[in-house]
Amino acid sequence: MEQRATEEALLLNLRSRRSELEALLDEFSNHWGFEDPIYRFYHQSFKVFYLQNETLRIVRLLESLAPDRALSAWFRQIVEEGTGKAFTPDANENWLRVTRPIVEAFFHARFFLEMAVRYASMEKAPMPLPSGYAALLSLYDLR
């Protein structure tokens, strides 16, 4: 019963903050918020490190949608491994090892932001559950 109430509160928060969610997703779907940072990874540019701040912005918004719940442990680990890094010249020698976690954390955060937007108009949980909505529930350990 508590889980159902938590899910209903999450749906209410998704609906009430839909425009904020959409604005952030738009920002991370355009040239400068999505295309350019991923290009920077392949170009081996230090600018890929900027994705860490963007990832944390998304995470803070996702956390605020269910402030009484911790996000999935796996998601938190992915974010932790992909943030808190500073560029140093030796990063170029180990580019993939150093920067892939940054990009991975961003992709996971952006995915959940996109799912939040996609399902923000729902009044109640659909049956059967679409995979994206089930993933969103998993983010909040509700599945």
Image (cartoon, rainbow, N blue to C red):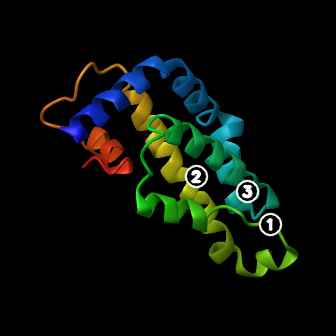
Quarter where residue 130 is shown: top left
Q: Which residue is label 1 attached to? A: 86
Drawn side of residue 96 relative to residue 136, left or right: right
Discs 1, 3 touching: Cβ within 8 Å: no
From the viewer's side, name the closer residue of 22 and 125.
125
Measured as percent of width and height from the top left, residue 47 is found at 79, 55
Measured as percent of width and height from the top left, residue 98 is found at 68, 73
Tell me the distance, in whole angstroms, between the alpha carbons under discs 1 and 3.
11 Å
From the viewer's side, name the closer residue of 94 and 20.
20
Give the amino acid type for the residue marked by disc 2 in the picture: Phe
> What SS does tag 2 mark?
helix
From the viewer's side, name the closer residue of 134 and 39.
134
Tell me the distance, in whole angstroms, between the alpha carbons under discs 2 and 1.
16 Å
Q: Residue at x 49, y 52 (%)?
A: 108
Q: Residue 48, labelled with which disc?
A: 3
Q: Residue 51, labelled with which disc?
A: none
Measured as percent of width and height from the top left, residue 53 is found at 71, 49
Measured as percent of width and height from the top left, residue 117 is found at 44, 28
Give the amino acid type for the residue marked by disc 1 in the picture: Ala
2 or 3: mark nearer the eye: 2
Drawn side of residue 1 relative to residue 64, left or right: left
